[in-house]
Image (cartoon, rainbow, N blue to C red):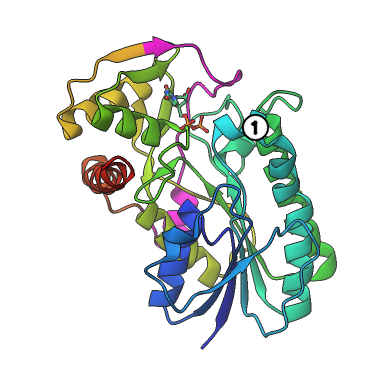
Amino acid sequence: MPTALVAGGAGFLGSHLVDKLIDEGWRVLAIDNLITGDWSNLDHQPDVVRIEADVSRPLTIDEAIDGVFHLASPASPVDFARIPFEILHAGSIATERLLELAIAKNARFLFASTSEVYGDPLVHPQSETYWGNVNPIGVRAVYDEAKRFGEATTMAFARYRSADVRIVRIFNTYGERMRLGDGRVVPNFVGQALRGEPLTVYGDGLQTRSFCYAKDLIDGIYRLFQSGCAEPVNIGNPTEHTILEFAKAVQRLTGSQSPIVHREFVTPDDPKQRRPDIAKAKSILGWEPATSLDDGLKRTIEDFQKRISRAQP
Ligand code: UDP
């Protein structure tokens, strides 16, 4: 039975990756500092070894490891001002430490990068060959530049230290177990609609995003890990919506009477458009998303409904 170390294993995507690895017959060690993760995300996985630790600090793991998955990072724009240094360290120091660990264990390493490496893109849709348009001193830079640094570190370890690496560029993803107070658009709109509060659209709502259901994304990440591709691959859903259209979809699927209101942007430099070009994932991994927005949102709404009623009996 191969062993995986999942950094960020108690988080939203980390916990879905743990589920996939368990299904595929792996033994899993989940590491998390619980800054945004929660062990309750793994309560249904009693065999997972839980390690509470910060992967940007020195780390000793005594046993053999076959795969190191680095998904440890806060990712919500509302966290960029709240915990900026933790985010910088997650992409930089932690990436280097986990790569050193992977080399010491002779394990394959996967870095969870992001569509944010493309910044506010001037090329649309975004393919892996686009170098991006990131403001290096903006509020979003703590995340965007840390992930860019993480990619550079990962490639340097591949080139000069013979590390066996994979890099996934994750586009907007949603699904069960997103934090209720996460601050990103899906948990905000779904939570607001279920509580009967107004849906807060930032700006005019004409900015676009392309939303991928978490299980589809994890399937793509696992295929990438198993593949021979050592360069970045976009994984995301190429169906693009304006945020206003998305708010209306949430209203429709929740049956909520909540009105839509417009608010100021929480972070400057909010990307105006984002859609992955997934030609590479299709040809190399044979992957494309399988879940429609309506189906994925219905499952997400059901999960949020349960957790909200548990929190407010
Ligand atoms: N957004 C919004 N209302 C919210 C939260 C987010 O209109 O309550 C917008 C945000 O300005 C952005 C998009 O939704 O244009 C996606 O934001 P999110 O924070 O989910 O992630 P991002 O793609 O910006 O990293």
Amino acid identity at mark 1: Arg
**Which element is circle 1 on?**
helix
For residue 304, what is the image quadrant? top left
Q: Mark 1 points at which residue?
A: 82
Give whichever of 209, 248 is nearer the camera. Answer: 248
Residue ranking furthest to the right: 160
Q: In this view, does 197 lie above or below 84?
A: above
Measuring from the top left, give residue 240's x and y in whole percent.
Answer: 36, 32
Does ligand 1 reach within 8 Å of label 1's beta carbon? no
For residue 267, what is the image quadrant? top right
Question: Is the stretch drawn in magenta largely helix, strand or loop?
Answer: loop
Q: Does the magenta stretch include residue 250?
A: no
Residue 275 can be seen, yes or no: yes
Residue range in magenta is 262-288
Give whichever of 10, 237 is nearer the camera. Answer: 10
Question: Around disc 1, counting alpha carbons within 10 Å, would you say few (fewer than 14), some (14 to 19), or many (20 or more)?
Answer: few
Residue 158 can be seen, yes or no: no
Left or right relative to 95: residue 207: left
Q: Is residue 269 magenta?
A: yes
Measuring from the top left, give residue 170's x and y in whole percent.
Answer: 52, 47
Residue at (49% x, 60% y) in the render: 39
